[in-house]
Amino acid sequence: MDRILEQNDTLFKLFEYSAARWHGRPMASYIDGTQAYTYGSFQEKVLKMSVLLARHHVYGGKVTILAENCPNWTVAFFASAAMGRVAVPILPASSQMEVSNILDHSESEALFVSARQLRKVEEGLRKKMKLIIDIDTLGVISTQNNGETEQNRKVAVRNAAPQSNDLAVIIYTSGTSGSPKGVMLSHSNLIHSILEAWHAQKAGYRDRWLSILPMAHAYEMALGMLYPLSVGAQVYYLKGMPVPSVLLGAMRQVRPTIILTVPLIIEKVYKSVCRTVDADRRLSLMRRRTPWLLDILLGAKLRKMTGGCLKFFGIGGAKLSPEVEAFLHRIHFPYAIGYGLTETAPLVCNACVGRTRVGSIGVPAYGVEVRLDNVDPATGEGEIVARGRNVMLGYYKDPSRTAKAIGKDGWFHTGDLAAVDAKGRFYIRGRLNNVILGATGENIYPEEIEFVINSYPGVGESLVVERGRDLVGLVHMEEGTEHSSLADAAKSILEYVNKRVNKQSALARIEMLTEPFKKTATQKIRRFLYMSPSHA
C-alpha cells in the first residue's frame, strides 16, 4: 500500500487506479441495493458530473456538498476534489445560518444538495450558484449558465490533474467552540490518512464497510470513504438515521467487517446490556458468582448482534468512557481507539485491535510525530502537539488562526492535555481550555467527573461547568427513565458522584435539563453553549 499510494499521490490518481484495478467489482450502494455502483460505473458517473460542472463554467472553484450519506455523495466528492476543484462538505445537521455562512465564506460556485437540505439554502445564495445539482438524481435543479463548448471539455480534462500539495477540501468545523473554521486539507493530507488507516488495520476487496457517521466529517470521509475505495472494498449506506432498530437490522443483513462509530453509540449499547443483566435474575447472579462466564455470553451476543463478521470496530471523535472500554476489553470485542482532529486529517494516535489499553488513545499513528508540549513537572501532563503529512494547510482565509495553531517548526497544537506512559501510550486528560482551576490551584478535569455522573443509572449525558466558585453538573436523563421527581433524581446523583470523586472535584449541585444537549457531528456536546447560567 505504501508503494501504491506513493505512485497515486492525489485523489485523481487514486480514482484512476481504483477504477482500473477493480472495474467490475461492487463499490457502494444503499442497504436495499439501490443507487448501486461498481468501480467502473462510479468512474463513468464521476467523469460525467465533472463535465457537467465544466459546461456550467465551474472549473477549479469550490463545490459544496450538503446532503445525508449516500453513494452519490462519493460521486459528488470525486467530481469536485479529484478533478481539480475544491470540495466543501457541510454536515447535514447544520442550521440554515451555518449553511449560509459556509456558502458565503467559501465562495462556492456550485452545490450538490439533497431535497431535505435544499430548504436551508437561502434564495439569494441559490441565485449566486452557477449550478445546483440534486444529489439523489444527479439532475440539474437550477443553473445560470448553459451551453457546451469544446473549450469547456478541454478545461474539464485539464482540471483533472491536481498536484499532491494542492487544496482538495475545506471542512468547516466549530468543534465545541462557537467560532467555525474552514480547515484546508490537501490531496497529500488525505492520501496520508489512507496510509495511516492501512497500517492501523489491513483491509482488502473482500471487506464490507457499513457507513453510519456523517461523510462530511473528516473521520468518516478519510477512513470510511477513501480507505475502502483505495482497497477495492464495498461500502453500504443507510437510508435515514442510524437508530438502534435500523442499525441492528442493517448489520444482520450486511454482516460488515468494518464499522466506524463514536462513543455515544457503543455507550448506549452498553447501558442497554446493563439493563438486561439487571432485569434478569440468573444473569445478575452470574455477574456476582461467575463474571467471566457472563462476559463470554455477552461477548458472543454482541458479536452476533453486529453481524458475526466484524474485525474492526473503530471508536473515535470523542473520549470513550473507561467503564465501557473495560467491558469491551473483557469480552474481547474487536474495538480500536482513534484520536485526532479535522486539522490532522484526522488521525494523530491509534490503539489498534488487540493492542488497546483502557483509557489510552494509543501510540502515534503511522508517519506522525507526537509529543507533549509545556509539560507540568508535577503531573507529567502537557499539550499534545503533532507533526507530519497529516497536518492541514491552514484555516481558509484566516492566517492569524493558522499561525496560532501551527508553529514555524510545523508542530500543530491540538489543545488537548495528556500524559504518556513508559511504553509511549498517550492518555487524554481533557481540553486545555476546559480545565478548571481549583481553590487551592489544582487542575480539575470536568471530563473525568462527567464519566462518574454518566455511570449513574438512567443518566443519558452530562456536563460539568463552573458557576461562580461552584462546580455544577448539568444532567439529561435517558428517555423513559423512571424517577419520582427531577429534584429527587438530582439529589441522588449528587450524593452518588461526591462519594466517588476527590474533595476538589465535588459538585455543589446538579441541574436537570429537560432537553438533550446540542452536539457536534461526532456527538460531542457543544460545551461553550452551556458555560453561562442562561444556557443551563
Image (cartoon, rainbow, N blue to C red):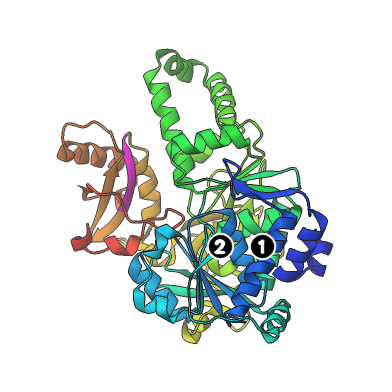
Secondary structure under tag 1 reads helix
The magenta stretch spans residue 34: no
Residue 203 against residue 172 in the figure, above or below:
above
Determine the residue positioned at 72% across, 70% down: 12
Q: What residue span does the magenta drawing correspond to?
A: 458-463
Task: Name the spot of residue 234 as percent of width and height, x first.
Answer: 68, 47
User: Is the residue under label 1 in contact with that under label 2 (CB below 8 Å)?
Assistant: yes
Determine the residue positioned at 61% across, 82% down: 60
Magenta stretch: dominant secondary structure: strand
Task: Name the spot of residue 306 as percent of width and height, x first.
Answer: 57, 34
Residue 20 against residue 391 in the figure, above or below:
above
* Image side of residue 388 versus residue 464, left or right: right
> What's the distance in space between the residues labelled 2 and 1, CA to CA?
9 Å
Task: Name the spot of residue 215 as percent of width and height, x first.
Answer: 54, 58
Residue type for callout 1: Lys
Q: Quadrant of residue 243?
A: top left
The magenta stretch spans residue 459: yes
- Quadrant of the rendering where the N terminus is positioned: bottom right
Q: Which residue is mark 2?
A: 138
Q: Which residue is mark 1?
A: 45
Task: Name the spot of residue 358 as percent of width and height, x first.
Answer: 55, 43
